[in-house]
Each structure stands twice: as structure tokens, then as C-alpha cells.
Image (cartoon, rainbow, N blue to C red):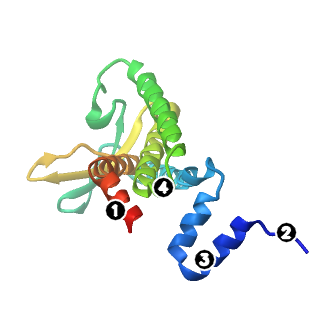
Amino acid sequence: MPIIPTSVVAVSATCRKDRVKCVTMLEENMPPMRQPLRWLWLSLAVIVLDLATKYAASAMLGYAQPVEVLPFFNLTLLHNTGAAFSFLASHPGWQRWFFALVAIGASVGLTIWLRRLKADETLLAGSLALIIGGALGNLYDRLVHGYVVDFLSFHVAGWYYPAFNVADIAITLGAAGLIWESLFGEKRRRSQRQS
């Protein structure tokens, strides 16, 4: 008869009573490296969605020719050699490599941070994964094309918000999650642990 470790028996008994506690116990018994890194699937999903939409926009839209979707929203294919809001786009080309290095450094740093998170830091993990996915999606464009493909364009009364893409949305949502987590995360986790 096989010997069953006591931790497996304890997890099994808990799972019959409380599913939420069961998931927490299973996560706690996972090897430490694998817990938070499972969020990299979200990063991969962001990269795939970002590259697929950029490919579709590049294939179906004429450069800088707006296609009205709604009175305040156009699909407009643009190539951004700079950073957000075309920052440094008018420079001779060094910015391509500078922003590529920034994206690589940020992705490595955020992945290390993600790896060190606790199992209950889900908002923080999801936020980091979104930023990593967005950074790598735009990094691919910079390295392969020399520019980032933007195609989502919102406007109101003649004022146009700078065009952006799915990677930019992921980075923005991730940054918002980091801000929210920094303001309210520890307090929320403390109250959850006490209950």
C-alpha cells in the first residue's frame, strides 16, 4: 500500500470542506517559483492578441487613412518610432534601441518581481503580467519593424488622442492595477487574512 504524505491528506480533507481554502493550500504547496509565474500566461495572451490585431490592422488599413467606426473612434494605421505619445519620434533612430533596452530591462525586472510575489497577491501579479505582455508586444514591433504599429484612435470635437494599440491598453491597465494595489492592496490582504 502506498504511503500518502500527511500534507496531501490535510489538503484533501480541507478541499471537501472549503474550496477557497483548498486552492490556497494547493498554491502554498506548489514549488515557490511556479506560483506567480503562472501569470505569464496572461502576458502571452496579451502578446498574441496584440500582434494579431497589429497584423490585421497592417493588412486591412491604409497608412494614415482613418476608417470611422463610431463618431468618436477611428481605426487609423500609424507607425510610431518613439515612445508613448510619439515621445522622441523625431530623433534619428537611436531611440529604437534605447526603448528596446528599456522594454527588455523592465520585462526582466517585472518578471523577477512577479516571481517573488505571494500567492494571495493576485491583483499585483495580474498587473505585472499585463505590463510584461504589453512591453514585449511593443518590443517585438521595435525589433522587427523599427516602429510600433498603432491603430486605435479616439477623438472629440477635433481633438485627437494619440493612437495606441492593445499592448498600450495592457500596459495602462497594469499600471492602474499597480497604483490601486499600492494604495489599497496591503490593507485588503490584511483584512482577508484576519477573517
Question: Type of residue at label 1?
Answer: Ser
Residue 9 coordinates in the image, percent (x, y): 71, 72
Mark 4 and mark 2 lie on one chain; the one further toward the N terminus is 2
- Residue 121: image location, x then y, percent: 44, 54
Instruction: Give the foreground label among 4 and 1.
Output: 1
Q: Tag 3: residue type?
A: Cys
Q: Distance between the Cα atoms at labels 3 and 2?
A: 20 Å
In 3D space, how far apart are the residues under numbered discs 4 and 2 (Cα atoms)?
Answer: 46 Å
Give the residue pinned by disc 2: 3
**Where is mark 4, residue-wise?**
49
Mark 1 = which residue?
191
Decide if residue 4 is on the left or right side of residue 110.
Answer: right
Q: Where's the C terminus, which quadrant?
A: bottom left
Q: CA distance from mark 4 to mark 1?
A: 36 Å
Q: Which residue is mark 3?
A: 15
Determine the residue positioned at 17% across, 62% down.
71
Q: Earlier in the sequence, mark 1 or mark 3?
A: 3
